[in-house]
Amino acid sequence: MTADDKRPPDHPVVPRPKRSLLAPFMLVFCVLVVGGYGALAYTQRELGTEDRDQIPSSVRSSPGGYRSYSFWHTGYHGGK
Amino acid sequence: MKTTCPSCGAEIEFRYDDSFVRVCSHCRAAVARTDRGIESLGKVADLVPMESPLRLFADGYLGSQSFILVGMAQVRHAAGGLTQEWYAKFSGSWGWLAEAQGRYYMTFEVEGAQLPPLESLAAGSQVELPTMLGAKRMFTVAEVGGAKYVAANGELPFKLVPDGFYRFVDLSDGQGNFATIDYGAPGDSPTLYTGQQLSLADLHISGGEVAPPRDEKISSTRLACPNCNAPIDLRAPEQSLRVACAYCSHVLDLQQGTLRVLEKLKLKADPRIPLGSVGTFAEGEMTVIGYVQRSADIEGDWYAFDEYLLYEPTIGFRWLVCSDGHWSYVQPVATGAAEISTKGIKYDGVNFRLFQSATLRVDTVVGEFYWQVKAGETVLGEDYVAPPAMLSHESTEGEENWSLSTYVKPSAVEQAFGKAQLVLPPTSGIAPNQPDPTQGVASVLTLSLLALIALGIVFAALAPEVEKYSNTSIVIPPTAAAPEAVPEGTEPPTPANVFFSEPFALDADKNIDLRFNTSLSNDWSYVVASLVNVATGDVVSVDASMEFYSGVEEGEYWTEGNQNAHEVVGPVPGGQYVLRLETQHGGGGEAMMSVVVRQGVFRARYFGLALAVLGLPFLIFGTWSYSVEKRRWTNSTEGKMPKTPFLILIGGFALVLGGIVAILKAIAESSSDS
């Protein structure tokens, strides 16, 4: 016996609105947006604004170390 | 008690001590036993054959109480309908079991009830009445009418007068409870009967007399039209009161298998679904037995719509309604089940909004009908919507009916009738109960928006923004002079425009905010900032430009640009770092610059970006939903368009604008601080 069978006669169930087929797609989209923001905010990562490099150990061990003029002005220029 | 019929002398038996009348099965005389003896009340007509699962002397159960059906009377309503009233003998009491159009109502007499005068009641009136258990309930009047006993059988607990007319009021509380007030003939005291509407399964009927031969039953389902002699197929012959001939468009009265011409219809009916078609719906298979074209009076113009009467003996009557190419499956709703609420009408926990109130007129008919349908007859109709459902109320002076319509896609109608080659009309506009195609999207977006805002608040509140290094006295020389030549193998001195900080500690997994503040005046500056990991030599670099100009023009002070800038770097491994700054500026002399390094800053830019990305679908679906609702409510005569889609639209706009403003602000902050 279903729940409908227990209803008095002439008391049909009101059909409830069905979710649009678009709703699941929007849910995925929203999860990606909110999740993406959450991941970005949690990891504190930036969307590609900086240049990353490494001063070779030979430069670091040479006179001047990381202050080496030749590194900054010949091998690496930094910035844009 | 056995005795002889005073009319024909045949032996008759009163099986029950408290039965009052026995109908003689030989001569149809209603024989009453009184304290003065046996007397005949007159002859009742022969029973009108009606298909019924109930039988005389059948057993049944109502809850834990057993009963037996000892008598039955056929009642002809003033409107033409025929119902059967069975008398159920319980242990020590009587129940009245009314049977009409596949519905069953078991009621019991309630003695001593204070009842309102008949004149004070009309369809839709509300009356508080006591029930069998003594508690009072609010009942709504479904019908005020009159009827007369036309035939009877078995034993009856009251003095049935053949052709005796009585007045009655039927009421329902909308929760399955049912009441009838029998006002009898003028001058009689009213009697209250209350009980419940039940399904056949609730009665647990079994046994009973074998049905007598049904010579007079309209067993033949094909009759000839008395006007044009065309064949007329009857699919619910025992329920139908009116038949409309498909060939000559005459409305015929159907009484006990005989057709009589009533009127000729001005408009020939042209149903899209042929009569006799069998469709499969959620409740089961149903046959199309009638078609009515009706019109609604909307501000003086009559708009036609089609109604198909469906019938199946175990289900009863249903309707399939087509308006502007949109279809609805319609089920009856008990009077009183719908209650008035502040938002319109509430039924089954759902609020319905008033959509339309109009006079409805019958234009033309074809097929057979359980009521005395007549072209030109009108009722007042009100429609309340909660898509995909619509609650309709139709009222006349003496009767009110409620029904529930469920939207059915045209493709589902075609599917319901299987391989039938239906040519359905194209849809136009938005139906009152057509579902919103964006249903559910708004809630997903709203919940996501709330989640995003909550995340933003949490991250903003938890952002530590710890200062790791600052220097307020960095000199930017006028030019970046190239170092003087030095002997090979030796390192030239650090140029004047390059600054190295002392090592300072940076934490892992936290972003780094570099804020620059200059003393520029009508000048520009450019800085390349590099964070050097002392231990590993890893370098992260960003650059920033600043320019600031001001002056007085026509007596007004103006400024342009910004003396500040900031750049954010993603997390670096924890350890000791040196900040290297290589600067330039455009003017002469020296400029001063300060720098502050902080970690764990809240990035409003990304929050704004996420807001804008969510705002875009808000805008799209809000516009779509608004468009649907606007088109739907354009056809409404009474209701106003709900605010929800409009609010979604406004919300979408606000979000997009807010997001864009936040992004622009963040970009402006990063490029030129104030």
Image (tube, rainbow, N blue to C red):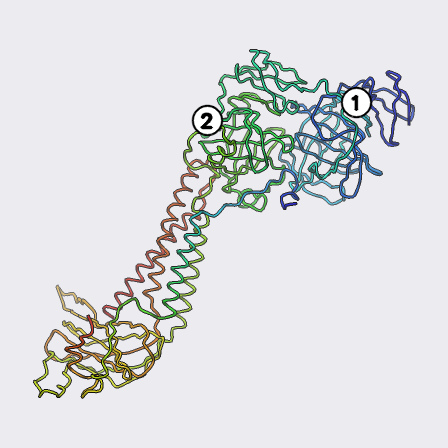
Give, as a three-letter code, the residue at label 1.
Answer: Val
Which quarter of the image is occupied by the N terminus of chain B? top right
Q: Secondary structure at mark 1?
A: loop
Q: Which residue is tagged 1?
A: B161
Q: Is residue B674 visible?
A: no
Mark 1 → mark 2, Cα distance in angstroms:
47 Å
Total numbered labels: 2
Q: Determine the residue located farthest toward the front in the rendered image.
A: A58
Nearer-N-terminus badge (1/2): 1
Q: How many C-alpha atoms fall within 10 Å of the one at disc 1: few (<14), some, or many (≥20)? A: some
Q: Is residue B593 visible?
A: yes
Give, as a three-letter code, the residue at label 2.
Answer: Trp
Q: Residue at x 49, y 18 (%)?
A: B268
x then y, percent, for residue A55: 23, 80
Residue B538: image quadrant is bottom left
- Which chain does the numbered disc 2 sit on? B
Q: Looking at the picture, does residue B619 appear above or below residue B235?
A: below
Q: Residue at x 78, y 43 (%)?
A: B64
Pick the residue in front: B573 or B48.
B573
Pick the residue in front: B150 or A22.
A22
Left or right of residue B555: residue B539: right
Q: Which residue is tagged 2?
A: B302
Confirm or deny contact between disc 1 and disc 2 (CB under 8 A): no
Q: Looking at the picture, does residue B369 appear above or below residue B534?
A: above
